[in-house]
Image: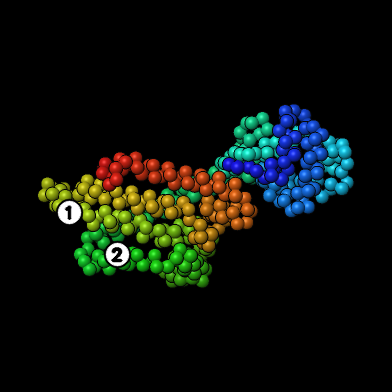
Amino acid sequence: MTDRELSETLPRTRAALAAWDGQGLPPETAFAALAQEAASALEERRIGALAQRLNFERSGLRALLLRTARAHDRLTAPYSESLPALDARWSDPEIWRLLQRAAGPTTSLYLLRALDLTRTAEGEFRRVDPEQAVFVTLFLRTLWVSVVVTGACLLLGWPVAACIAALRPPWSSVALLLVLMPFWSSVLVRSTAWFALLQREGPVNDLLILLGIVDAPLQLVGTRVAVLLSTIHILLPVAILPMVGVMTRLDRRHLLAAASLGAGPWLRFRRVWLPLSLPGILAGGAMTFLLAVGFYITPALLGGEKDQLVAWFIAQFLNRDVNWGMAAALSAYLLAMAGAVVALLRVLTGGTPTGARI
């Protein structure tokens, strides 16, 4: 990924560090260039992006860079002595090697950090500290929620699709219209409706108390249960539609032939109906999963801190932290996850347009 903050903000420092072999401390030219260019960048309000970039790699570097820039009037040559006198961290070769690595033009920092990895000054890869290791757990959580939602939508949607396919016009059209009605409102509206339903004073808690299932209202908003229920409801029509499309085109004479050969209802379902409807099941599952992995607004409204998915973190890095590199890295891995599902679907269907290999 591109990494131009340091080269654009401190070009002379970058040039001085490029000639440094990484052993000991860099030459005086690097110290002098850093002190002068940091002060100039602060005065011209160009130092913020670089300070944020360095602080993302090591906490505390933002404060160090800004402190150095503000103290330029008190710094005198030789800068290789006055900078360490201002802050002892400037006498640490590791800080300078970090600046050298940040000189660009590309970096693997964000791609590694999105996997909870980091790269040492010696070029070795290691896991970040436990308190910073959040992204692998985040991807596993996103995958788990997406798989559960997809499975639930298929289990609930298959009988509905089979019933719609068995109806005759105009009732089949009426049933299909009822399935399509949720699309008339946005995901935000449906998520907000679930927020109202699941509140402590909402209808769901009132019903549970009325039936004697619970004695006091449950805290449902801000839980994984709320995220799963609302996401399943929102994505259920997406799973139903492909299955209806496949089932309405099935030749029911296959079922009659199986019955005439002595196959019972369960055998007809398992050996005839289910295999013939499998392309619709796979298509509905793939569409549901691909939408679930990128869900943002529903977990944000109904989930707690530990229920947010990858999309929420991407939005935070874009809108709050303005860290486009990290947002791009998370997006790339999320896209790879979706691509893996599409590839798996292609393998399961034999790579044919109709998914004929059963």
Residue behind mark 2: 176
Residue 85 horizontal/vertical position (percent): 86, 40
Q: Residue 247 lies in what quarter of the image?
A: bottom left
Seen from the viewer's position, the closer of residues 78 and 181 is 78
Please determine whether, in this image, residue 90 is positioned above or below residue 43.
Answer: above
Using residue 77 as the reference point, say whether residue 289 is left or right of it: left
Residue 172 in view here: yes
Residue behind mark 1: 252
Using residue 288 as the reference point, say whether residue 45 is left or right of it: right
Q: Is mark 1 on a helix, strand or loop?
A: loop
Question: Dot 1, how many residues are within 10 Å of its Cα: few (below 14), some (14-19), or many (20+)?
Answer: few
- Residue 299, disc: none
Please determine whether, in this image, residue 315 is positioned above or below residue 135.
Answer: below
User: Pointer 2 and pointer 1: residues touching (CB < 8 Å)?
Assistant: no
Question: Dot 2, how many residues are within 10 Å of its Cα: few (below 14), some (14-19), or many (20+)?
Answer: some
Using residue 188 as the reference point, say whether residue 46 is left or right of it: right
Residue 350 horizontal/vertical position (percent): 30, 40
* Quadrant showing the N terminus: top right
Seen from the viewer's position, the closer of residues 78 and 292 is 78
Residue drawn at x 71%, y 33% as measured from the top left: 18
Residue 341 horizontal/vertical position (percent): 41, 45
Residue drawn at x 48%, y 56% as measured from the top left: 295
Q: Is mark 2 on a helix, strand or loop?
A: helix
Q: Farthest residue in the left direction?
A: 260
Q: What residue type is labelled 1?
A: Arg
Q: Residue 36 lies in what quarter of the image?
A: top right
Seen from the viewer's position, the closer of residues 306 and 45 is 45
Q: Which amino acid does label 2 sit on?
A: Leu
Residue drawn at x 42%, y 61% as measured from the top left: 234
